[in-house]
Structures are given as structure tokens and as C-alpha cells.
Image: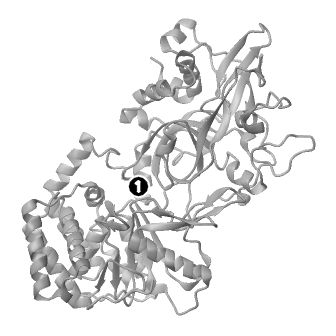
Amino acid sequence: MPGVEDWTDNPLDVIQNLIDQHGISDNTAVRDYFGKRLQHKKALSMIPSLNDVALHNLRPNCLVKYRCMIQDMFDPEFYLGSYEVTDMKSKQTQMLSGKYKDVADARAHQEINIESDRNVTMDRQTLYCVPVPGESDWVKTGYSSQNVQTPGASTSNPHVRSKRGRDDDRDQGVGDISDQPMNDIDTNLVAAANGGVPPSDTEPKRNRTAPSAGAAPSSSVDLNYPLPGETGLACLVKTYDDIDSFKVNDVVEFIGILSVDPSMAQFNAKPEGMEEVHPEFETEAERNAHAPPPSLVPRLHAILSRKLSHNNPHLPPVITDPDFVQALTTVQSEIAQIRSELLSILEHAVFGDSLSAEYLLCHLISSVYSRADMMPLGKLSLNISGCPAPSQDYSKLVHCLVSGLVTQSFLFPLTIENMNQMKLSPAKDYSANRLRSGLLQLSEATQLIVDETKLQPGQLNPDGLKNITALGNLIKWAKVEYDFNYHTQEFPTNVNVLVLSEGESLLPKDCHTKLEKRHNPDDLRSYFGQLDARLTDELLGKFRVYFTLTKQLEYSISDDLQKLIQDDFVTARKDNPKCMTVDDFHSLLSLVRLLTLSHCQPSPTLDLWTRAKQLETERRQRVGPPRTTPV
């Protein structure tokens, strides 16, 4: 069996051998080979992560993993999937694979026959990926702690290594590896020119170690992160399998081969007589967007991928995993204590208001589970009014608490300036042929906190009106309109929105509650600081697992309780139709569902239905009849 270093440090050698055995058109053998070796947690922890390890500490063409959100999907890319090389000494020809790499390589004594009829042009999908927007620090730390720390590694070319005996190679399933240096050409350059037909005047060899002088400086590269202040590595991920299964805003973990060849960079100035580096791009803006310096935006050729149903590092990524089921069983056995302690923490954050704490808990575990026509089901957008003045930074303190509980979150100050100047909805940039991100391009299960206490009187410009409409559509319909200039396209989203305001919010909401303070602290920072001693690592761990599990639970209502609920609705309508509208009934059904999930139960009980009615009655008495929102 190959050692770890064989298939992690030099995966291209293994892939070439597998393709020699199974052919170029089927990737099953490659996926099975690496999938089998990475099915155990220990093996997966040995793979360095682009989320944690600096590029200069990674060897080119090594196996890496990357946790990200798909921000954009580029047009399919043509490349040399298979190409012929000639041994200049023996004059024998050989077919090599161009898969999982950006440059077609040949050894010093070989020459690439770019005009060979045996060359095969193929296509692959390129995804522009960014770190998960708003990912909490504890999530980053949790994933990082699961990885074996990668020491400073050489960034020199890994192709040079000691020869192994033929018997060893045969036993390990890896072909004989020459220790001579390689010569390379850009597979995209050859395949994309002239519509995928290799041009006759293309330079057959390119020096891999050529300096990247002239590469665009970092200040000129727009990494296109959705949220301001985001850090981390963006990456161009090239996929070969299940291309249609990916969509924008998916959170995915890719495992593949790192490519940081400097020849892939777009040069600002082209020396006289030198061929265009990327002739397939029509404008300079498109070249800068699609071919940024790999030192800033590396390429990853995906071998394996998995969409993450959640982003909690303390739980298995697959909900059918026995460890996931065991975690659910453990939480259910301790649910009374966990829920009581969590409500106590939330009560403290809302100044002792137990009603608002109940609704805040239900809001935090809410999630769109289905859609009936245009109506998203399961969400509970919440407006808490009566919040302290903006000078006390109440919203920041609430966000600090919430970000320690959920996997992704962002605090957005709702000001006239932000509305007029920021871009909330993504828009297509046709000159760069890319999707310009907006603040509302967020992944599933992101918690968005809108600080309306910052809002002051002012005039919204046309962009501000578009932004306030976009924010309202996100809250009400759980969708974001992407602007394609000539038309807009709606993308469904699953983002929780909590609006903190002094008076009732001008934005839409599913539920509005007004704070009734039992405590009136003079110093909010000290008041929230009292939670530090209570929020131990152990307790935080339980809360974080709890929030993830409750979002994954299946929910159903028994026939008997369903009939009882229907009878309640009919009786209430008879007594006073204005006090129980269809919308009111729908809100009650949503609330009892969330109360049930908050107890980690799959089905409600009569007591929970009664509790939901009590909460709604108390809330309505407090806030009065709902008003029509202008958005």
C-alpha cells in the first residue's frame, strides 16, 4: 500500500497511474482511490487545509482541503485532458493526463506534441469560492484543532524525489517516476485557443520556475467577498464530476490538488513579441477576474467534494453518522437543563424579559424547511423593539453573544449612509464576466442582525431604495434578487434576520416583541460581562451542538393533535373572527413547531400547543395590533 506521503504529497503521480489503467474518461477510479483513503477522520486530519495553512507552507501539487462558499460559477473551461509527448532520445511517444492540473508537463528529455491528433480536449467547471461569510471564530478554531499541524513545508517543485525500485512501484500501484525536471505548457492556453483546437504556433514548453514579476499587485485584485472586513483565502476550484450538482451559495468542502503555478497569473504588461497569457478572455477586467495571481487566489483541482448540511465542527457532517445520532440522544437526555440554562442566558441579554427570551430562542433555531408556492415555511424573522440607544452598543453586545452560539453571523448597522452606498444585492458585471457579490449573498443558516437603532432621519437615493427593498424581500420572502442588468433572477435563501430597534421596525417581520426590562444597568458592557463566568467552554459546547441539532430535526404532527388544533381554530373564529385570522393561525403553527424543536422533540404535545397560545396572547397584549410595513 502507498504511504501517506505518496498520495498526499504527489497525488498527480498516483492519478497518472490510475488513468493509465482505467482510461481518461472515467474519474470513478480516482475518486474511489482517494475516497477510500480519506474515509477515516485520522487520514482526513492529515490533509492540510487552505483555511488554516499559509500558501508558502504548502508544496505545489499536494493534496489539500478547503471549506468554502461558492460565490460564482464561471463558464466551462477547455483544457488538454490527454496529450502526447515524445521522448527525444528514444523517439517513443506516450500519452499523459492533463486532468487535475493547470499546466501540461513533460520531463526534460520529452517534448509535448501539441498538434497531435491523439490529444483530447475536455472541459471542466470553474467555481470561484470564498471563505464562508460571517463564519464564527469558534467554528474556525474548531476545524483547525481537528487538523494535524502542518510544519513549514518547502515550496519547491515536488517532482524531484528519490527513485524507488520497480518492485516497490508495482506493489504500490504507482508507475516508475523519473527524477528529472519537468517542462510545462499551460493546458488552458493550448485547449482554449481557436475554440479548443491547439494552435500551431504555441510555444511547447514553459519554465515552471519562471519568476512571477509583473503579476498584478494585491491592491488591484478584487477578491469579491460578500461581507466587508472578511479575511481568508479565496480560491478557484476546478471540478470534473457532478458539475450540475453545485450552485451559488452552497457551502462545500473540497479535497483536491493545489495549483499555484506562477504562469497562471495575469500580467499587467505584455513584453513585445510575447503571446497573450490568456487569449480566451476578451477584456482586461475579465482576465483580472478569471486569472488572478495564484499567490493570492490559488487553484484547487477537486477530486472529492461534499456539501455541508451544517458548519459545526463539533458534529459529523453527515446527519446519519452514528456519532451525530449519539449527540442527538445525549442532548435529548439533558434537554431540560440545556434549555433552561440557555433561556437564562438569553433572558439576561434582554434584561430579564422572559417572553422576549422565548421568542429569541425560537428565532435562533428557525429555518426554512420548505416552500408553499412563494411562501417560505419555517422561518421566524423577529423584531425586538425597546432596545437601548445606539450609543450603548447594545446590538454589538447581542451580536457578540449570538456569534458564540451560531456558526455564521453578521451585524449590519442600518444607516442612511450604508443604504445609499453599500451593495446589498449581487449583480452581474459583464465587462469582467463575473458576479459581483453583495452583502446579502450569504450561505444557509447565517444569522443576520440588523441594528436599526443606528437609523437617523435622511434621504434615500435610488440605490438606497433598491437596498431597502432587497432587505425587505429577504426578510419577508427569504429570497434575494440578483441583478443581471437586463433582468433580475430570484435566488432562494435561508438567512435568519433579527432586527433590533428602539420603536417598531419599518422592515417586515414575522414577529414583533417589545422589551419589558426587569433590569436597567448603567453599564451594558459590564452587564453583559457577567455572562463570561457562566458561559464555560463545556456549556458553550452544549449550546452550539443544540442549535445545530434543532435545525436538523424532522417534525410532524399526529392526527389527533392536528384535529384538536383545527377545532381550536374553528372555535376561535366563531368567537371573534378578527382575533384569529388565517395569518394568525399560521403564526401559531410556526410557533408551536419551533417550541417543539426547542425541546428537541419531533412532534408537539397538547401542553406545547397550549404554551404557544399563551405566548402569542401575552405578546399581542404587549405590542398591540400589527401595523402595515411600508417595505
Q: From what the image shows, is residue 38 above or below residue 421?
A: above
Query: Could you say where residue 460 lies in the image, as x and y percent from the top left?
Result: 58, 86
* Left or right of 507, for residue 616: left
User: Which amino acid is tagged 1?
Assistant: Val
In the rendered image, is residue 369 in sight? yes
Q: From what the image shows, is residue 37 above or below residue 109?
A: below
Q: Which of 299 and 531 is in front in this view?
A: 299
Quick one: quadrant of the N terminus? top left
Query: Could you say where residue 385 lies in the image, as x and y percent from the top left?
Result: 34, 86
Task: Please identify the quarter of the rendering in which residue 189 is found.
Answer: top right
Task: Please identify the quarter of the rendering in which residue 499 is found.
Answer: bottom left
Q: Which residue is drawn at 33% across and 82% down?
A: 384
Query: Could you say where residue 246 lies in the image, as x and y percent from the top left?
Result: 48, 47
Q: Residue at x 56, y 25 (%)?
A: 25
* Left or right of 56, for residue 282: right
Q: Residue at x 47, y 29 (%)?
A: 31
Q: Nearer the viewer, residue 253 or 379?
A: 379
Which residue in the structure is indicated by mark 1? 139
Q: Nearer the viewer, residue 231 or 124?
A: 124
